[in-house]
Image (tube, rainbow, N blue to C red):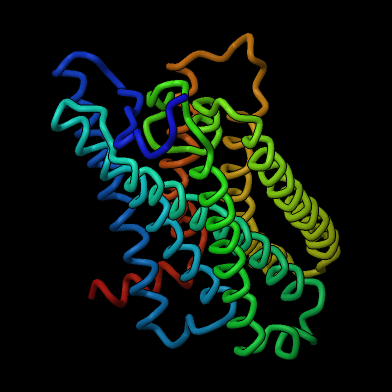
Amino acid sequence: MCKNSSITEFLLLAFADTRELQLLHFGLFLGIYLAALLGNGLILTAVACDHHLHTPMYFFLLNLALLDLGCISTTVPKAMANALRDTRAISYLRCAAQVLFYVFFFGSEFSILTIMAYDRYVAICKPLHYGSLLGSRACAQMAAAAWGSGFLNAVLHTATTFSLPLCQGNAVEQFFCEIPHILKLSCSDAYLKELELLVFSFSLVFGCFVFIVVSYVQIFRAVLRMPSEQGRHKAFSMCLPHLAVVSLFVSTVLFAYLKPPSISSPSLDLVVSFLYSVVPSALNPLIYGMRNQELKDALRKLMT
């Protein structure tokens, strides 16, 4: 039996076999990565520099931008380096670090999206209590809980996954190190412990998703009862970007993990993983920037 200590590297799934396509994928990844850096960097700069944006909503948006940068920086640079160097290798320690940081940023991001739904619910359904429920201290505590729970979850998953004996080779059927694909390399019943942790984590994610859905049902009921058309437009402009980000985030993940085995293939899995691990980080700033007039005004001030 091949133990973990004998594996010094893993082989990731390549996007293409020919050199021309590898360089094309490098250029695609580079463009998306630079767009994510620019978009999220502008949000961070605008929120930090404009005192009009020092509110709970933009504080959580700043956290979301940081997490988006973390998510995409965990997976894309290594994929670009492998495409440029015509290699598939990633060291054992780098693979473990990639799992740790990806689970950390991914889990924390969904927690922040859940908190943002609560923020919108309080702002629209309980505006008189907004200051007391979402003061600066409460916002800092909620953000710290999101980051802390994400880190604890990542440590538990990474420690459990990389303590398993691996005897099914070292080829990971993914362009980055992801827990389900590493579990396929295990030859011990101990992987059931990690599966239990995954089920527990998905249960928490499902609970957060239900909370978001219920919050938006209450929000839309309150918005539709508003007598002012301007008030309804302002409420929708605050809520629709967040709802679009959540929908993109959840739909791609659900399709990746719940799609029927009959339509599963390495190429389809690669495209779907690209959609939920790379695309949201680049699109989120665009979604918020298109619908948020205050953010656009702050960015315009920065430019001028």
In the rendered image, residue 286, in percent from the top left (x then y), is placed at 42, 52
In-front residue for pair 194/117: 194
Which image quadrant for residue 77? top left
In the rendered image, residue 71, in percent from the top left (x then y), is placed at 42, 52
In-front residue for pair 221/7: 7
Residue 85 against residue 211 in the figure, above or below: above
Residue 41 against residue 182 in the figure, above or below: below
Which image quadrant for residue 51? bottom left
Taking the image as drawn, is residue 131 in sight?
yes
Q: Residue at x 48, y 52 (%)?
A: 287
Q: Is residue 189 left or right of residue 11?
A: right
Count of numbered circles on the image: 0
Q: Residue at x 48, y 72 (%)?
A: 294
Q: Is residue 4 left or right of residue 155?
A: left
In-front residue for pair 203/181: 181
Q: Residue at x 43, y 16 (%)?
A: 267
Q: Is residue 118 left or right of residue 293?
A: right
* Quadrant in which the C terminus appears: bottom left
- Residue sitting at the far front: 1
- Residue sitting at the far top: 262
Taking the image as drawn, is residue 282 in sight?
no
Q: Residue at x 33, y 52 (%)?
A: 73
Residue 50 against residue 36 in the figure, above or below: below
In the rendered image, residue 122, in percent from the top left (x then y), is placed at 76, 74
In the rendered image, residue 195, in percent from the top left (x then y), is placed at 67, 38
Residue 42 against residue 282 in the figure, above or below: below
